[in-house]
Image (cartoon, rainbow, N blue to C red):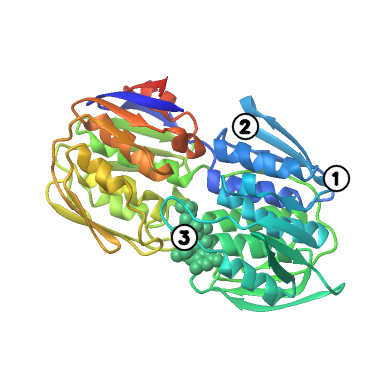
Amino acid sequence: MDKFIIQGPTPLKGTIPISGSKNAALPLMAASLLGDSPSTLNLIPRLKDIYTFGKVISETGAGLQFFEDENRMVIDPATIHSYEAPYDLVRQMRASFYMMGALIGRAGEAKVSLPGGCAWGPRPVDLHLKGFEKMGIQIDLDQGYVHGSIKKNRVEGGVFKLNPSSVGATINLVLGAVKRAKKFIIENAAMEPDVVLLCKMLQKMGADIEGVGTDCLTIRKVEKLNGVTFSNDPDRIETGTFMIAAALHPDSEITLTGCKPEDLGKFPKSFRKLGVETRIDGKNIYIRSVKKINPVSVTTKIYPGFPTDLQAQWATLMTQAEGFSKVTDTIYFDRFSYVPELNRLGANLSIDKNSVSIKGKTALQGAKVMSTDLRASVSLVMAALVAEGQSDILRVYHLDRGYEQLEVKLNNVGASIQRVPE
Ligand code: UD1
């Protein structure tokens, strides 16, 4: 296991290129399995989660080549001979559960391990399963595995309302329906950019999906989907994370390149309230920090609201704002494992139900802290960048799941981060 040794404080100055989106890439990889020929995916980030999902895909017998230097992946589904995603891989990454939809779509059957919980609590998949059943798929649970199968030759489909709206369930059900369900309607479907991109790829492959980008998707079965060449989108969460990092230190000046600002939803609206100079120009986002940041309270919501994947970073930023603020998560109620760690660095945060109250501005001091999950980890790195002295961030493998070359990108703009074995 590696740790980061970070010397702070350091302002960030220069240009940071944004990588391809992790959360969007995984469904695109799953969609490739539905084609009759190989698909080529561009802008695929070199991340632990991508490699893990690559292994899950390879387990089925599909061909997979990752041209890492070019961030290009080619997936050939022709050789698939197994319809199983084993526990050892699924437990490492919940998105492996997308194999349910992908394999039902491809073969009419799937055996996928139930993913289990997460560092920040239970993350159910009941809606995925109910949706498949509503579609006409037989679902059986056996020894921690979900078996999905098509009993009759035809799956008529139906109408399924997601409550709450779920990104994961929408993706899985779309994957399962496009080649199977005569007509399947998903109401209150997630509208996250990841879902929209998946639908666009499937449409390019030949799928019949109506309502893309809205909260009601109507899917009508097609017999055949073709492999395609398709480009992933830039990572909106990485973009937001670096915007926040640029605002943290009063002397930072950063340009993010290769962004897709329209995918950020209402995040820039909250960001502008900080008083930080922000300019969005095509695919570039320019940020110049200021001495005094305004406290800005946020509440996470489904897209286009403030993303749950940015709340930990926002709370970190609020430790440097002049005054009191609150971060509330309405998607996941206990995603606050970063709070005691930030307090170890000298922050003044307290948890009340699904909210964190932050009293700023506090001078942060370097310390040893522990990463607990992906977004918590990146928050600790950001806090360490403005903390006085040395911080050791333990267990950074969480970061490798979701941020491509984080320390390289930050060191290029002035940070002092060393990766060493723990
Ligand atoms: C969520 C985020 C996503 C983020 C991901 C990882 C939202 C809407 N989704 O996606 O942007 O990238 O975390 O950090 O912000 N639920 C059920 N039953 C299910 C599935 C979900 O009750 O079968 C609930 C969840 O507990 C949650 C809500 O629905 O409260 C949203 O779920 P979903 O969008 O699927 O969550 P993730 O895919 O984890």
Can you tell me whether the CB of the residue at mark 3 lies under 8 Å from the nearest atom of ligand 1?
A: yes
Circle 2 crowding by C-alpha within 10 Å: few under 14, some 14–19, many from 20: some
* Badge 1 element: helix
Q: CA distance from mark 1 to mark 3?
A: 36 Å
Mark 2 or mark 3, earlier in chain: 2
In this rendering, the label closer to the viewer, 2 or 3: 3
Using the image as rendered, state which of residue 297 and residue 381 is in the foreground.
381
Residue topped by disc 1: 78
Q: Nearer the viewer, residue 68 or 4?
A: 4
| Viewer-side label of 1, 3 | 3
Labels 1 and 3 touching (C-beta < 8 A)? no
Q: Secondary structure at mark 3?
A: loop
Where residue 421 sits: x, y (%)? 43, 21
The percent position of residue 80, horizontal first and vertical second, equals 83, 46
Q: Quadrant of the C terminus?
A: top left
Residue flagged by tag 2: what amino acid is it? Asn
**Residue name at image x 66 percent, y 33 percent:** 72
Q: Quadrant of residue 68?
A: top right
Residue that numbered label 3 is attached to: 122
Considering every residue shown, the one lying at the far front of the view is 143
Residue 88 in the image: x percent, y percent?
Answer: 63, 45
The quadrant holding residue 345 is top left
Location of residue 253 with respect to 218 vertically, above or below: above
Q: Which residue is mark 2?
A: 71
Query: Spatial distance from mark 2 to mark 3, Cα to Cα?
Result: 33 Å
Q: Position of residue 367 (x, y in %)?
A: 23, 30
Quarter of the rendering containing residue 353: bottom left
Circle 3 residues within 10 Å: few <14, some 14–19, many ≥20: few
Q: Amino acid at mark 3?
A: Pro
Q: Label 1: how many residues lie within 10 Å, few (<14), some (14-19) or many (20+)?
A: some
